[in-house]
Image (cartoon, rainbow, N blue to C red):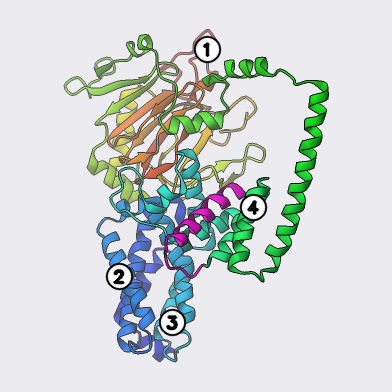
């Protein structure tokens, strides 16, 4: 065994040492920043594969063609890793390749007596994304589809706004998305993606997936949504391709029986209504329409509307009260000669943005410090208080202390100088990188009255305010939205937004409930500072009224 290891080529040893940096990480799909490492891993795997092909070229022609395709892809991807992975289809396909397709390749090569490449690939696979990563990336595409009202064909053809690395989905990709939705009993998305797979097959795309398999899933998904007539149509089409398909034969009889049953029930209902007279429901419809205002829309719908830029618009009168200014915080020595640019984003709650408040060099230093420590972001369970991951928070985060690097200390001092609030009792700087379709659904930053022990272990009181740096531009999506008031703040690199979570009285401002919209295209980096009550007694005196 020792002799075999010594015989491994030098590129293998280099690759293994590179992969050691990935061993501490999982949940790759929750951070685009860390997924870039996988692109280099995949590129090294392609190099390894091509070396193997040169030795076995006559026997492995199929493998060589596959490798050439991957070589071209990874060469393009590694020129701009974050931009490439900013396209959610590229990110999904990366998860799918590493989790599924490389495994299929392993099975092919095992049929040959030469095992050098196989042993190397087997070792490396322990550092690959898991089934959870592939499923997470797939569900992210479904989430983006719903939030931004994208049809399956738009995603499949890669026609997303502002993309630099357009990527198309194959029949196998569409089929995989449909299967993942099917496994969750999500028949709506199963139908969308199986229909897209069928469309591409009908257009002549070559695939290992046949129409019979796709039609089987498609007809069942449509039946589960109550559309028996359409389900019957697709089942009959399936039987034309495979007349001996036993399940389809049984389904045709069942669907025809159910349709006949529905027809009779409809006739009986029609006769009953004719006897009793038709009811006038026009007035009820009018009443429903009158209630359809933004405030009556469910929070989830408001959140998605704001993410698409369809939120509540300010009246011209309110808009006229928002200003841009040079801000020196009452002649603070730091800003007398160089005041900061301050811009009003919203009036109630009062949200301000500071422009050019963090430099590119500082951003790169923060990312450099944070990237090795990024871990799946957690939420505090409101019942148990235990930190746990959640499907509605798709990102990775790391905490940076002021004594780690002068840049972090300088950033903390800058926040204190601008806000006038004490930083000694604030939480450490949290850095977050969002993953495929990365988001954080509506939440409060402060502890509510039904969470009296929310920050008890810190001993610094409630979160009085939030400071949020945007450390990257986002091509599409990724806004910070406030569903209760209809506000949306869009990421702009080098800026920061600030708002108070508590009124001066110490009561929570429930209008600050906010969310991070899914990133449609691009890579979103942010960092935030949660500022607490203790130490602010003389800096922000208490108000006498509850909402003051």
* Gap between marks 1 and 3 measured at Cα: 67 Å
Residue 43: image location, x then y, percent: 32, 68
Residue 301: image location, x then y, percent: 53, 31
User: Circle 1 sits in a helix, a strand or a loop, which is it?
Assistant: loop
Q: Magenta stretch: dominant SS?
A: helix
Q: Name the residue under label 4.
A: 231
In this view, the mark in front (1 or 3)? 3
Above or below, 109 relative to 26: below
Above or below, 538 relative to 27: above
Q: Mark 2 points at which residue?
A: 71
Say if the magenta span includes residue 208.
Answer: yes
Q: Which tag, 4 or 2, sits closer to the chain's start?
A: 2
Above or below, 164 relative to 466: below
Say if the magenta span includes residue 427.
Answer: no
**Magenta span:** 183-209
User: Which disc is residue 547 wearing?
Assistant: 1
């Amino acid at each position: 065994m020792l002799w075999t290891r010594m015989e491994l080529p030098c590129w293998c040893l280099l690759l293994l040492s590179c992969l050691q940096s990935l061993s501490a990480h999982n949940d790759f799909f929750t951070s685009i920043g860390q997924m870039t490492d996988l692109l280099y891993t995949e590129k090294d795997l392609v190099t390894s594969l091509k070396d193997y092909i040169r030795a076995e070229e006559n026997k492995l022609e199929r493998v060589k063609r596959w490798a050439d395709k991957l070589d071209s892809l990874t060469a393009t991807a590694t020129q701009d890793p974050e931009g490439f992975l900013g396209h959610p289809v590229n990110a999904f396909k990366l998860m799918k390749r590493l989790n599924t397709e490389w495994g299929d390749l392993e099975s092919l090569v095992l049929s040959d007596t030469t095992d050098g490449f196989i042993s190397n690939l087997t070792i490396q696979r322990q550092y690959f994304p898991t089934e959870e990563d592939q499923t997470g990336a797939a569900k992210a595409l479904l989430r983006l589809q719903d939030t931004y009202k994208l049809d399956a064909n738009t995603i499949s053809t890669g026609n997303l706004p502002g993309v630099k690395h357009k990527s198309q989905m194959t029949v196998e990709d569409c089929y995989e998305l449909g299967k993942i939705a099917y496994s969750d009993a999500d028949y709506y998305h199963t139908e969308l993606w199986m229909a897209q797979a069928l469309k591409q097959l009908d257009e002549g795309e070559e695939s290992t997936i046949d129409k019979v398999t796709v039609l089987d899933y498609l007809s069942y998904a449509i039946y589960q949504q109550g559309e028996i007539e359409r389900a019957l149509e697709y089942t009959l089409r399936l039987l034309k391709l495979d007349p001996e398909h036993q399940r389809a034969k049984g389904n045709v009889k069942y669907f025809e029986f159910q349709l006949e049953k529905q027809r009779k029930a409809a006739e009986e209902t029609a006769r009953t209504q004719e006897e009793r007279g038709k009811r006038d429901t026009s007035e009820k419809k009018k009443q429903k329409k009158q209630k359809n205002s933004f405030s009556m829309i469910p929070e989830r719908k408001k959140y998605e509307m704001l993410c698409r830029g369809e939120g509540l618009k300010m009246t011209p009168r309110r808009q006229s009260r928002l200003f841009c200014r040079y801000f020196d915080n009452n002649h603070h020595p730091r800003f007398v000669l160089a005041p900061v640019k301050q811009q009003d984003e919203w009036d109630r709650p009062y949200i301000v943005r500071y422009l050019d408040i963090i430099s590119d060099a500082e951003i790169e230093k923060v990312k450099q410090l944070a990237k090795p420590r990024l871990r799946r972001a957690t939420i505090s369970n409101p019942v148990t208080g235990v930190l746990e991951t959640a499907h509605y928070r798709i990102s990775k985060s790391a905490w940076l202390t002021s004594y780690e690097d002068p840049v972090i200390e300088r950033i903390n001092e800058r926040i204190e100088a601008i806000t006038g609030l004490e930083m000694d009792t604030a939480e450490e700087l949290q850095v977050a990188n969002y993953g495929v379709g990365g988001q954080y659904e509506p939440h409060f930053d402060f502890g509510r009255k039904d969470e009296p022990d929310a920050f008890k272990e810190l001993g610094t009181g409630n979160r009085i305010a939030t400071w949020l740096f945007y450390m990257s531009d986002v091509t599409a999506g990724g806004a910070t939205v406030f569903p209760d008031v209809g506000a949306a703040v869009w990421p702009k690199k080098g800026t920061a937004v600030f708002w108070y979570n508590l009124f001066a009285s110490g009561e929570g401002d429930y209008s600050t409930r906010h969310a991070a919209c899914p990133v449609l295209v691009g890579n979103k980096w942010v960092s935030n500072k949660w500022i607490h009550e203790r130490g602010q007694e003389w800096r922000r005196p208490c108000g006498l009224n509850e909402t003051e």
